[in-house]
Amino acid sequence: MKLQVTQENLNRALGSVARVANARNPLPVLANVLIRADNNRLSIAATNLDIAITQYVGAKISSEGSITVPARLMQDFISSLPGGVIELSLDELRLHISADQYDSVINGIVADEFPVMPTITGGTSWTVAAPQLKKALQQVVFAASNDESRPVLTGVLVHTVDGKLYMAATDSYRLAEKELGPNKTAVSLLVPATAMQDLLRILGDAEDEVKVTHDDQQVRFQVGDVELVARLLEGKYPDYRKLIPQSFSVTATVKRSDFINVTKVSSLFARESAGSVTVEIDADSGKLSIRSIASQLGENTATATGTMIGNGGITLNSRYLLDALQALTADEVVFGFNGKLEATLLKDAGGATYSHIIMPLKS
């Protein structure tokens, strides 16, 4: 193998794929990236057996070949080089890298030991705009669970309801759902949240369409010259839509920035009580107040004004409340609940396509 490629292109490709390589895996080759030159194009790939990412890079290829090299070393080294043309050449299992005043050799593992990169033959395909998908991922993925004892909740559900595409995630304490708009294809995919986090990094500032292809076991996202393939999670996702309240006895419509500020201040006093804060709504005064008590430090009440309907209070985890408020996008948000032991809902005021539910704490 012998080729020339720009430092910028190679560095970008390594940044997209190398994160998937896992140095803690018992298979040493999975800590490597696969560099392959064939059919007059260069591909950089990595996998952890559940997620695989491949990026194709424009390069001037003199001779074909392939090798796997340590992902971390390769990424750190290439990112340290100055911009310009890099020459890669392979001598058995030694990858020679030459650039300007740098001349290095990285020892690799034969490409035959690298797992076969997954492919989807046939399957169902549809497209979604990259900026729209990126926004949905930012608003939903963080609500997925990290608890491997309930693997279904470590995924993000991508599904259609009445001809509209939705994305949802929950850890059983909170739930985030985003509507992405009409989709004629019937979809029901449970994608690992870790794969969605990698997809979010890949999307970056992409403006084009993302092509999604899936079968019963895998899903592939194609964004420009990058493709991510993930193994779908098995199991039945909870019927979460039954949990979304349709009406409220107590609501507050307030400026999102004000709500964030009073929550942040109150959370400082809530560290001792595992983030517990009490949100009170008073329609008579038109105020929403958040109260937190730290027996050793003191107590705090912070207030925001807005449009209130009904009177009542509910105790929530302040970190969950902040996460939800920061995921919302409108200048004003609606906060509603029925009883202090029932789910509370946050959404953007006016034409909301994003809903965030937080389960209350026992006060």
Image: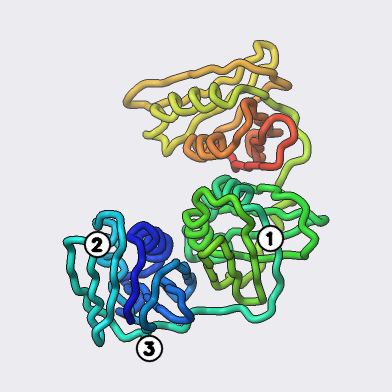
Lower position in the chain sequence, tag 3 or tag 2: 2
1 relative position to 16: left or right = left
63 relative position to 160: left or right = left
Location of residue 58 in the rendering, given as x and y in whole percent from the top left corner: 44, 67
Q: CA distance from mark 2 to mark 1?
A: 36 Å
Residue, disc 2: 77
Note whether 67 is above or below 262 in the view shown. Answer: below
Under circle 1, the secondary element is strand
10 Å neighbourhood of mark 2: few (<14), some, or many (≥20)?
few
Lower position in the chain sequence, tag 1 or tag 3: 3
Amino acid type of the residue that numbered disc 2 sits on in the rendered structure: Phe
From the viewer's side, name the closer residue of 124 and 344: 124
Note whether 241 is above or below 228 in the view shown. Answer: above
10 Å neighbourhood of mark 1: few (<14), some, or many (≥20)?
some
Under circle 3, the secondary element is helix
10 Å neighbourhood of mark 3: few (<14), some, or many (≥20)?
few
Q: Residue at x 62, y 59 (%)?
A: 210
Residue, disc 3: 112
From the viewer's side, name the closer residue of 255 and 100: 100
Q: What's the mark number on residue 127?
A: 1
Q: Residue at x 55, y 73 (%)?
A: 231
Amino acid type of the residue that numbered disc 1 sits on in the rendered structure: Thr
Note whether 53 is above or below 347 in the view shown. Answer: below
Does residue 175 show up? no
Residue at the farthest top position: 285
Circles 2, 1 touching at the beta carbon (< 8 Å): no
Lower position in the chain sequence, tag 2 or tag 1: 2
Q: Answer with the quarter of the image where residue 165 lies.
A: bottom right
Location of residue 321 in the rendering, given as x and y in whole percent from the top left corner: 53, 36
